[in-house]
Image: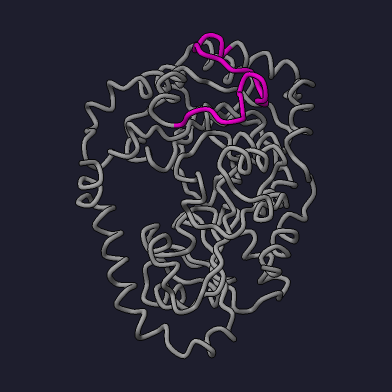
Amino acid sequence: MKAIKLLFNKKGIQAMASYIKTIILIPFFGGNIRKYKKADIWLISDRIDGFNDSGYWLFKYIIDNNLHTNTYYISKHIKEKYKKNIIKIYSLKHYIFFIRATKCISSHNNFTAPSIVVANRLKDIMPIKKKYIYLGHGILKCYLAHLKDNKIKADSIILDSEEEKKYYHSILNYSEDMLFVTGRPRMDNLYKNDIENMILVMPTNRVWIGKVVKNNINKKKFLETEFYTTYQSLLNNQKLIKFINKNNIKLVFLLHPNTMAFIEQFYAKSKSIEIAINNVENIQLYLKKTQLLITDYSSVAFDVAYMQKPIIYYQFDIKRFRKQQYAQAWFSYENAGFGNVIYSENKIVEEIIRIHNNNYHMDKIFEERIKKIYKYKDQSNSQRAYKVVNEL
């Protein structure tokens, strides 16, 4: 029943259309295999908006250093500097280059294909055999069933941590020779900190809201969700407003892209609080500017921890999250996280004030945990990742 519903919703129809289109185009553009093998086309992608995740930073490194001229980045937008090597997503050129590509590199499991269905179902029948390199969106901290037993058909996986590697090998059943701890390329851009007097509040997606935004949940129902009432209350907490006004602090509230449809429902009484538009390209700018991150379960906490900035985890709906979204994997927020886990609004405000009074220094216990997580802390992740891709 679930599969039938997926097949006939908007995403399912788009996926099937991409699948049929690719099948039709293979005989026309998959011929003359020798010629296209010599071209050795590499495709790289992230989310459809692009320009902020590991795929883009690896692409940038390859092009800037003239390492492989037949490398192309798939995106919804065109960046002028790299326009010769950027392909508009879902364009005819996208389909053709995917058919002809030899290496498909992505931070998401669509592996540069027009859809996950195309990537998964058609890989083995392509006239030009492909290597799939999975960069991952961030350190794998939760149990993701779709990754188990290499259902995504990856040939190599780029990782940040030896702990992550152990989990992929022992629990998700990946062979060790396909797991490479190089550090994710996007971390190379997190070395320069442009810190402002700013606090970033960035909750992650909730599948029970985000996946049915356009179908089942109207705005009135959204206003009744615990997610909305909790964050709306925090944004208008009088003690918090008094504190940020007194200390000239700007607080930025940034929703996950999957819940951006409800951004207009949020409001704040203080001019010091900004309800920001989530432009995917600008996420790293916010992460670099903030002096403190308040999140719940988002992987952006790893990026902020990499920059050794304090973090607060606001997990008011942890039981529901574990039950309906992601089960726990090797990473425990309480025992391995980079900040205190808070469950109530008053405690959140108290923790913000405590961290402010401590000049936004990260507690020593959390600094030690970061050292254990990251194998590399330099600007050579893209270089190491490129070496893995090149030697495949």
Q: Position of residue 71 (x, y in %)?
A: 59, 73
Q: Residue at x 71, y 76 (%)?
A: 66
Q: Nearer the viewer, residue 43 or 357?
A: 43
Q: Which residue is found at the position 47% from the left and 72% from the top?
A: 87
- The percent coordinates of residue 293 (x first, y second) are 60, 29
| Residue 246 included in the magenta stretch of the image | no
The boundaries of the magenta stretch are 326-349
Q: Is residue 251 left or right of residue 187?
A: left
Position of the N terminus, as image quadrant, is top left
Depicted 185 relative to depicted 210: above or below: below
Q: How is the image coloured?
A: one colour
Circle count: 0
**Viewport quadrant of the C terminus:** bottom right
Residue at image position (50%, 44%) is 148
Q: Nearer the viewer, residue 38 or 334?
A: 38
| Residue 342 among magenta residues | yes
